[in-house]
Image (cartoon, grey):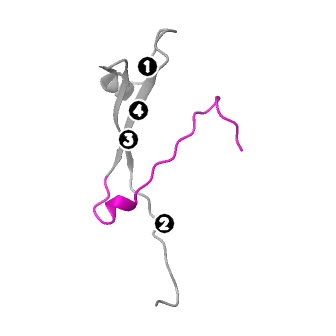
Amino acid sequence: MPDKTTFNTVYPELYLADMNVFGKSYLQQTTQGEVHLQARERFVNFTASARQFTGANTVRFQYKLEGLEDDG
């Protein structure tokens, strides 16, 4: 058993793989800046990816919607 456990604190770069609303992809628009949606388009799906070549099964994503969720 090792005396000391170390953790990798270099995080892989995060990539937005897709953003879609009701099955329509907005990925190209996200790369060009802001995306404007209609009020009825309130169900948005994001797909994120990260290049991690070792221990890929240990990669976890965390997100926060600024302006919507508390800082707690």
State the residue position of label 3.
48
| Frontmost residue, 34 versus 57 | 57
Q: Decide: few, some or many residues near mark 2? Use Cα within 10 Å; few <14, some 14-19, many ≥20.
A: few
The amino acid beneath tag 4 is Phe
The three-letter code of the residue at mark 1 reads Val
**Comes first in the chain, label 1 or label 2:** 2
To which quarter of the image does residue 27 belong? top left
Q: Magenta part mainly helix, strand or loop?
A: loop
What separation in Å lies between label 2 and label 3 (alpha carbons)? Answer: 20 Å
User: In the rendered structure, are the residues bearing label 3 and label 4 in contact, judged by CB atoms less than 8 Å apart?
Assistant: yes
User: Where does the image place residue 25, in percent across and percent down from the top left?
Assistant: 31, 22
Three-letter amino acid code at disc 3? Ala
Tell me how far mark 1 sits from mark 2, CA to CA.
Answer: 32 Å
Question: Going from the N terminus, do you reach mark 1 or mark 3 first?
Answer: 1
User: Measuring 71% from the left and 44% from the top, which residue is drawn there?
Assistant: 72
Question: Spatial distance from mark 1 to mark 4, Cα to Cα?
Answer: 13 Å
Q: Residue at x 44, y 59 (%)?
A: 11
Q: Please, what secondary structure does the residue beneath circle 3 have?
A: strand
Residue at image mark 2: 9
SS category of the residue bearing label 2: loop
Q: Which residues are magenta?
A: 51-72
Q: Residues within 10 Å of mark 3 (few under 14, many from 20)?
A: few
Kind of residue at badge 2? Thr
